[in-house]
Image (cartoon, helix red, strand yellow):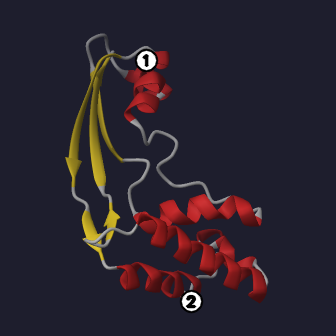
Amino acid sequence: MKHCYSWLKSGGKLGFNYWSETSFIEGYILSKIAPKYNIDFPHWHKRIGSQETCFNLLQEIGFKKIKFYQDQLGYYLDLETVKNKWEMMINFPVANDNLFPFKSLSDEKLYTAKQDYYQELENIKTPQGIWNEIMTVTVIAEK
């Protein structure tokens, strides 16, 4: 974003979108359990996922008049659907283990990680199901 700032004229605007820090429940839950297995699996949206973090980042660069617009596109999923995503992720045919680093675990640890994933889902389930937040945030900032 520093580069974008340097390219703008005074009064120029930068606009971009990002997902909230807790968007997409599967990745969010995996990022919560990963440290237990010494896996580096940061949630994709953590870098600027909160408005406060994004605001501070832009302000530090020098942007002014920073505005946020949110749009919630989330929905409820039934518990079994989200649990079944584990199998889809672990069996997804990719050559790059970085996409699902849990594959590198032994069978025993992988089973335990799966149970941790399930337990995290159980902890957040509601009568409506599992909330799958998909919060888009649009940001407009002025130089």
Q: Position of residue 13 (x, y in %)?
A: 27, 23
Q: Label 1, label 2: how many angstroms apart (C-alpha)?
A: 43 Å
Q: Count neighbours of disc 2 (C-alpha within 10 A) and say few if under 14, some if 14 to 19, many if 20 or more.
A: few
Q: Nearer the viewer, residue 130 or 24?
A: 130
Q: Position of residue 113 (x, y in %)?
A: 66, 76
Q: Which mark is first along the chain, 2 or 1?
A: 1
Going by the numbered disc 2, the residue's amino acid type is Asn
Going by the numbered disc 1, the residue's amino acid type is Gln
Residue 59: assigned label: 1
Q: Are marks 1 and 2 in contact (CB under 8 Å)?
A: no
Residue at the location (61% across, 80% down)? 114
Q: Is residue 134 found left or right of 29 in the rendered image?
A: left
Q: Is residue 139 above or below residue 10?
A: below
Taking the image as drawn, is residue 102 in sight? yes
Q: Is residue 61 above or below residue 127?
A: above
Quadrant location of the C terminus?
top left
Q: Is residue 48 found left or right of 95 in the rendered image?
A: left
Residue at the location (42% across, 64% down)? 124
Residue at the location (28% across, 49% down)? 136
Taking the image as drawn, is residue 39 in sight? no
Residue that mark 2 sits on: 91
Q: Is residue 77 found left or right of 39 in the rendered image?
A: left
